[in-house]
Each structure stands twice: as structure tokens, then as C-alpha cells.
Amino acid sequence: MLSGLLLIPLLGAIALLVWPGAVSGERLRRTCLALLVLQVAWSLRVLWQFDPTISGLQLEEIAPWVGSLGLDYRLGIDGLSLPLVLINGALSLAAALVTSTSTPRPRLYYALLLLISGAVNGAFLAQNLLLFFLFYELELIPLWLLIAIWGGSNRAYAATKFLLFTAVSGVLILGAFFGLALATGTADFSLQPLLGQELGMGMQLLLMGALLVGFGIKIPLFPFHTWLPDAHTEASTPVSLLLAGVLLKLGTYGLLRFCLGLFPDAWQLMSPWLAGWAAVSVLFGSLAAIQQQDMKRMVAYSSVGHMGYVLLAAAAATPVSLLGALFQMVSHGLISALLFLLVGVVYATTGTRDLNVLRGLLNPERGLPITGSLMIAGVMASAGIPGMGGFISEFLVFRGSLVPFPVPTLLCMVGSGLTAVYFLLLVNRVFFGRLSPPADDLDTPLPAVPLARQIPALALTVAVLLLGVAPQALGTLATATTTAMGRAPQRLAALPVSAAPDRLLAGGMGQ
Amino acid sequence: MPIETPIDVPLQAYLVLAAVLFCTGVWGLINSRNAVRVLMSIELMLNAVNINLMAFSSYIDGLEIRGQVFAIFVITVAAAEAAVGLAILLSLYRNRETVDMERFNLLRW
Amino acid sequence: MNRFPLYRIGGPSRLRTRAAAATVRSTRRSFEADMDLFGVLPALTELPHLAAASLASVPLATAPAIGLGITAAQLNSGAIAPEAAILIALLVCLLVDLAGEEAAVRWVPPICYAGLGTALVLLARQWNAPLEPSFLGSFLADDLAVAFRAVVAASTLLSLMISWRYVERSGSPVGEYAAILLAATLGAMFLCGSTDLVSIFVSLETLSVSSYLLSGYMKRDARSGEAALKYLLVGSAAAAVFLYGASLLYGLTGGSTGLDAVGVALQTSATPVTALALVFVLATVAFKIAAVPFHQWTPDVYEGSPTPVVAFLSVGSKAAGFALALRLLVGCFDSFDTQWKLLFTVLAVLSMTLGNVVALAQTTMKRMLAYSSIGQAGFVMIGLVCGTEDGYAAMVLYMAAYLFMNLGAFACIILFSLRTGSDRISDYAGLYQKDPLITLGLSLCLLSLGGIPPMLGFFGKIYLFFAGWADHQYLLVVVGLITSVVSIYYYISVIKMMVVKEPQEASDVVKAYPPITWNLAGMGTLRTALVACVLVTAVGGVLSNPLFTWANGAVTGTPMLQQSIASSAAREATAIAAAPVPPTPAILG
């Protein structure tokens, strides 16, 4: 069942690569789209079979693989991974849709797209640490190629930077996994038995530190974020969309699943610092975004800020905040994908992303009215205007975290306010005012964006709206899991003497 | 089968001789610029080994004389090695018209 | 200076490379040089016989003393049946070579395949066979030996498959080339199973002398000759050092050369002379596996030698070196394991660091792969230092994985240099458009060498690191992890050249790429070997469980390793038992 989510894209990628003879780009594109639609359908089938009342893993698949390494093929899904798998399917499809039909080297391009999609699914579903690592690394080279081949002028630098940062993150994660599996003396990398292990605090802190930095690079959090703006700036629109929408979630997913899940005691000990780190990351991302002149860099820095909320919520680790973290991951996936998509449309039609050049694109006759409207919607969602997806997730995060960590949460709220500032700046400059296209003759209208290219953006906007209007759909899927995750550390903490988990509980009880 | 051992000379004397010879060989190996001299230095080292083997063989291993067998192998292999070495050197000399190690510098060391 | 291609050694281009030479005279001279080099061949072909003889004659010398008539059954000579198959193939190759070049081109390849194939089949039959020392303790066909011999034989098979076209282009006689390569194989295979100082020495020299000749095989290329000379001088010196150590060991044991006897003798003596012998012998082992700082010869030899020879040296010769290391260190110096493990920890750290860092700066593929192979040897040494069951199994596994990924990479660069005559990394720019097969194959093999999933190399490397971590070799594993990130960088930069560069950025060499044809003699086998290696590299990782079982079996089926594991476990147990005893105040006072 779950294997289908891996096999469809991965085998599809191989099939595209070895498809004999010269195949037209259009045909490859259609095959890729068909495979991605199939993948989405399959994930909907998984959704259909998924029982939201169970907090643990479902639909598990276990097969022995390499016994000597403690690596077995073990998949499972729960309320945390299911929404991310759905998002991955949808955004991969969107990325393939918005790819220009005349993209160079289509065979490699679509194969890599499928490869990434499959690898990300694998990472979300893997219930064995080494299996997770395998998929985590598997996505590395395809994404590197996607940036390095189809990127902008400075793509070689950005791609290599991405590669090295991610490789270092992989090494840290692998080291922590080794340490974990062997410190427990089992030499088995299956996740479930490891969850119940009790380690010494020193060891927990050490291993968790390695994991934190490893995933912190991927998320990215403040001092390790420098690869992200470069990668986004140079990557083409579909790749940016995937990167922001899906791949960053690997980091936060790892944070929740592994850091929080495997080291509950150390996590609780460190959580005030983590909350502080989250606040710093949020404020830094927001302030840096204000300074940007490039639309894409601005959205990229906003990602740094918004992913900080997830760390804050994870640090608080109350049921509400964890639900908020999941909401934030989903809504950020949708919103940032939407924003990158629209920035890509603007760049494609005007040839620039410079805030100092662009003016008045909302002009109904000669500008990009639909794109502009959607952009405003996306920006509102990102800034957390009620009724949109961003609001509900930020609300849940802050609601869950305010009691345990009032100061960092307030700082993060400030960051959220700053989001409004820089995005207003963006909208104000780019879409309002007098249209002055870079071309000499002012009368020529900008080329109209074909409706087909607007569909993914429209669909994403609708999804963002739906998430804001009807959050309970996602809530029912995830609540059981996040509640269990949120309680687990408290239970563990409550068992020894009396670590007074009142503060933590308060957040949960207040619901 | 009893073997008469030269009792007058202690085993250590042979070992010291071999050690000196070996060190001489190493010194020549490091300091020679002429490739033929380098080959000769290697022969010196091998001969030091042979002295060692023969001495041990007659002092310690009088019955099975493994050392002497070993020495014969060393001599044979050294001959083959020297033949190959000189052949390579000769072909190189015909290409480069020198046997100076310092001038074999097409490849970075 | 004109960086001429190695294979293009026809008169004119050859002459261009020499700065000041009277053209006619020099042509004649190099022709004479050919004659001279081949005058050596009789001496060379004696070596394999010598190797076999060494096995037989050590016991023969002892026979009168023991007072036994010795028959073939008592010698257990069936243990070297695979080597015998190769020896027969070697002799037939030489005979066929006498019948002229045409007959040689036609018949030598099938003869080699038959010999090596038979050897592999016979090796498979030896797997887990009841263990009995052969030739009165000179040779032991335990599972470890079988595994490493199989790696050596397979590497020769693949190296031969990728070299026919190359050898033919260079205008050298095919029969001789195959014979020398088979002789080297023979030496390497004997080395894997030798358990006596004499047989170790003779097989080591058989391997080495054949390797010198192979690396100097492009007689009219000055660089090849230079590489051969350097290899020969350093190798002979290393052999002499090894012999000196061996002669000391012979004396220390009181007159025996078997590794078991040496091991027993070493347990009771810890004199400075013993330490000296240990250092001498270890230096040779380190030389053979090209561990830093005994690696100096590698880049030069790799760059100067014909590429197929480098392919064999980097895999077959290195596998034999690791087998030797296991025999000597684990089987013989077990009582000194703290010392040699420390030493090899240092060597491994240096090898991983220097090999991978210097590889960053290389501009030619062969030199880059030379330094990368130094780094890879450092990774394998992690398994050696662990001394656990997993550690040894990881070594065997990684050598097997390395066989396929490295030979696959070499097949690709040989194919590229056959088509373009270039070896420079920058000349690979934009290759994807002209030659997708090389691009895909080389990319996959390099990714595998860099340890990217789901390639075979990923599993091998993870297993090594896992074994190292389980044995608390944190320093080694951390250095290994960091340097593998470094290695990813330089492997990736080659892939970047080939895949990422746009057609307009393609190198001149690629722009003038010849049309792809496979119908020339020897190209078919090259393609077969390339595709086979790449397939195993790419798919072998996902289906690697049998390989893991095999590697673990090689360790469990080897009494020598089991003893060492058991004794180190016992030592650990006593250490743990002794640890809780608090130090008495009397001692402190």
C-alpha cells in the first residue's frame, strides 16, 4: 500500500530515463504528469484507508533488507506524515505543471522531479533510521542537478553551496543515528524500539545536538540558513516551489519525529533555549526579508522566519502547539509554493524581480491583474490574516507556546507582524502605483499569462483558503498523533520524581 | 644431522654486519642520483637480508635450514627484479638519454 | 608541453613529445628498447613458476628432516587449483603469442576468459570447504583467502575486458600483455592465501615485478617508463625492507617461517628487535595498500601507467595488499594489536585526509582517481582497525564494492580516452550530449565512490562506519564522515563537468567528439564490462543483502579471524572484570 507511494515515482523516474529512442518533451511531460496524478490518487487512497482515531503508525509494511546493518524496509504512516505526503504529491504535481513546456533536457528534468518526489515520500514514511537517512540523501543529487542545470546565472555556486550544506547535515544526522543505535546497544535502526529507550542525559544532549544542527541546516534555522536564499534565487520556479514547499519540511519533520520523539528528556531540558533560538531565527528571517530588493530572496527569507515557528511549537511540545507545528508546515508549504509560483510568473513576464524596478503590475489592462490578486491573497495568508491558512497555524502555534514560553512567543508574534510589513512593502511597490514596464514604449501591455499556467496558482490559493476556513479537516487527521506526541514527553517527565509538568500541561488543558 | 657451527664468531657479529650493510643500502638508496646506483643499493639491502638469513639458519635452525632456502629464493627473485629493473632503465635511457633520477621529472613526485 | 595521449604512440606524435631528439635515430633506439624489454620476458615468466615452486620447495626442504615421503594429497595441492587454471591460461597465452600477432588477437582473450572463469568457479567450490593447510603450512585456502582471491580474479577479468582495444591501439603484443597481467594476478592470488614468510615474499614479488612491467608497458612513452622505474625502485626498496623484517622474525622464532609459529613466538618476546621487525613489515603492508605516508608512488604510477593497468593496480593489487595486511597483522602480530592498531589509526586518518583533500586539486582523471583511491584505502582501514567481525566483513564487502565501482569508472575513462585521447577533467565538459553512456556510467560510479545512496558504495561505506562506530573508533568515523563530504565535492565536480555544462560550454575535445561506434575489435567487451560494472554498482546496493551475507560468511569461515575476535573479546572481558577493582591506597601512596 504505502510502497506504491515510493514505487510510482521512483520506477517512473527510471522508466523515463531509460525510455528508448528520442521522445518529445511534450510526451515526457505528459507521462510525468500522469505519474504524478497517479501518485496523488494513490495518496488519496492511503488517506481513504487511514484511520484518524489511531495515534500510532498505520498501514505498516515491513520487509527485511540488510540485516547486518540493522536496516530493514519498514514503512508506516501516522497523522504527522500523512498531511506531508499529501502536500508532497500536490506540490510535485504543481511543479511539473508550471514547468515550461519547452524546458531543455526534459527527460532528465522530469525524471529528477519524480525521483525527488519519491525520495521525499520515502523519508516521510520510513520507520527505520537508516532508511530515512537513505531517502534523505537520495534527494540530494537530483535537487543539486535541478538547481545546477536549470538555474539562473549564478547557479553553479548556489547548487554547490546547497550540496555541501546538505551533505554536512546528512553526515551529522548519520552520526547521531549511529550513536543512538549503538548507545542503546541494539545495533538495530528501527524507529519504534528506539523510541522507548532511555539514555543518559549527556548522551541524549550530544546526539540531539547533532540532530538539531543537522536538521537545522535543512529547515533552515538562523546561523545555518545561508544556502537557502542563494538556492532559491538561482533555482527555477518549479524547483523553488518544491524546495520551499516540500524539502524544507524534511527538516521540520525530522525535528518533530526524531529530535522530539527520540530524546524527550533532553528536549525538555533544552526547550527554553530552543524557543529562544526559534525567536532569534524568526526575527532574523523577518528583518532580513525587509532589507531584500529581490522578490525571490524576500520570500526565501520569509521562509527562514516562518520555519522558526515550527521550532517554537516543537520546543513547547504541547498538544496544541504540535498541532500548530503541523498546520504551519502544511500552510507554509502551500503559501510559499504559491508565492514562489507568482514571483516566477512576474519574473517570466517582466524579466526582473527587482523591487526597485517593478511598479503597478495590478494594472487591469496592461499588467498582471490575476497574478497580482493571487499574490495579495498569498501575502495575506503568509502574514496570518484571519480566514487564511496562515492564520490558523500561527494562532495554534502561539496559543500552544504562549504559556510555556511567553517571551519567545511574543517575539515570534513580533516577527509575524514584520511579515506583514515586508510583504506590504512588496505588494505596495510591485503591484500598486503607476505601471512602468522596463520597455521603452509604455503602451505595450505585458504579455498575458495563459490560463493554464494560472491554474496551479489558483488551486493553491483555494487550498490556502480552505485550510483557513475549514481547518478541522486537517485537524481530525492529525490531532490524535500530535496529541500523543505532545503528551509523551510529559508522561516521561512525570514518571520520575516530580518534574512539575504543570506549565506544559496548562497549554494542553486550556484548549 | 649435526651441523658444525663456527663458534668463534658470535651470531651478533653477523647481525651487526647485516645491519650495517642494510643501512649502507638505505643510505645509497636515498642519496644516489644515478638510477643504476639506486638499483645497486637495493641489491645491498637484499644481501644484508641474505646474511641475516644464513646466520640465523646456521645458528638456530641447523636441521630444517629454512633460512638457506629462503636465501635462495631471495637471490632468485632479486635477479629477476634486477633484470626487469635494468631493462626498464635501459628503455628509459634510450628515451631520455639519462639515468639521472633528478631528471626523471615528467611526473611530479 | 604537449600533453599527449598515452595510447597514441605512433611515430610522429611520439616524437613531438621529445624536446630535442634526432628523429630517425631515436625511432630506431626505441625500437631497440622494445627488444631489450622483451628479453626480460623469460625471466618474468619464471616468476609464477617460482611462486608455485616456493610453495612446494619449502616443505621439500624440510621433508628429509621430517622423514616423510610427500605426495600431492598430503600437500593438499588442490587448494591452488584456481591458480593452476590461471597458470595454464598464462602458458597457453605465451604459446599462442608465438604463433603470431593475428592468432594472438584472436585466441588470447578467450583463453584468458576461460582461465579466469575456471579459476572463479574453482574458487566458488572452495567456499566453506573443509579447511586444511596446503604445502605444509605455506598456503591456506580459508574463506577470507577465497573471497580476496575472487576479488583479484574478477578484477583481472574486468581489467582484461576493458584493455583489449587499448592495448591494440598502443600497438603492443596482446599475448604478452595478457601473460604479464595473468602473472600479476597469480602473484596477487597466492599472496591472499600465503601463510608463510617465504611464500608471502615470492608471491609479493611475482605481483610486484609483473606490475613494474605492466606500468612500463607503453615502452615508447617516456612517462610510462618513468612511472615503471619509480614504481620499481620504491617497490624493491619496500620488498627489501620487508625481507629484512622477515629475516629478523625468522631469527626471533628460532627458525621457522610459518606465520602461526611467528605469531606464537611474538607472544612471548617483546624486545626492541621485535618492534623493529614489526615496523619493517608494517611499512611494506602500508606501501602495498598505498597508505599515507607510504603513498608517494601512487599518483605518479597511476598517471604514467597505461589506464587498464591502473585499473588492475587500484583494485586487484590493493585487495591482495589488504589480504596480506589481515594475514600479517591479525594472524601474526595479534599480540601487538594495541600498537599496530594505533599505527593504522594514524595511517587511516592521514590517508583519508590527504587522499581526499589532495584529490580536490587534481586536473586529470587518473591522478584524481589515484588520490581518491588513497582516500578509499583509508576508509577500508577503518574495518582493519576495528578488529571486530563487522569490521572484517565490512572490509571484504567494501573491497568487492570497490571492485565494481572503481573498474566501472576506469572503463568509462578508458573509453573516453580511446575516443578523444584526453584525460583532463575539463575536457569532459558537456559530454552528456555526445556520449550518454559514458556520462551515465561515470556519474553512477563516481556517486557510488562518494557514498551516495542507493549505490553500492553507500552500503559499503555505511557498513564500514557502522562497524567503526560499534567498536568505538569515533575519531576514525568522524574523520571518515567529514572526508566523505570532501570526496563528494570532487566527484561531483566531474559530474558537473559532464552533466551540467551546456553544449556551448563544451570542451573542444567534446565538440570534436567522434561518432560512437562499437564495431572495432575489443570495443564490444569494453562495453560489456562497463555496463556490467555500472549495473552492479547501481542495482547492487538495493540488492546488497547477499553480498552482506557473503562478506559475513567470509569472516565466519576464517578461523584466523575468529580466533582474533575471540581473543580480543576475552581480553575485553578480563579488562571489564579487572576494571571495577578500586586501586588500593598502598599503590597510590
Image: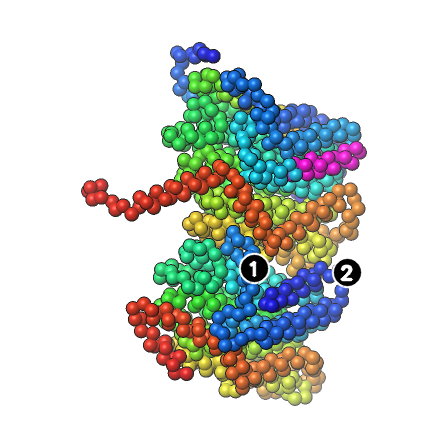
User: Where residue A65 appears, x then y in whole percent?
Assistant: 56, 56
- Residue sitting nearer the eye, C544 or A463: C544
Q: Amino acid at mark 1?
A: Ala
Quadrant position of the C terminus of chain C in the picture: top left
The quadrant in which residue A100 appears is: bottom right
Q: Does the stretch in magenta take in C346?
A: no
SS assignment at label 2: loop
Disc 2 versus disc 1: distance between alpha carbons? 36 Å
- The relative height of residue B38 versus residue A57 in the rendered view (above or below) is above
C123 sits to left or right of C272? right
Determine which residue is flagged by label 2. Answer: A21
Mainly helix, strand or loop, the magenta region?
A: helix
Q: From the viewer's perspective, tell me whether residue C399 is left or right of residue B59.
A: right
Q: How many marks?
A: 2
- Residue behind mark 1: A63
Q: Which residues are magenta?
A: C102-120
Please state if B99 lies on the left or on the right of C177 as rendered.
Answer: left
Q: Residue A57: image x %, image y %?
A: 51, 69
Percent x, y for residue A384?
Answer: 50, 83
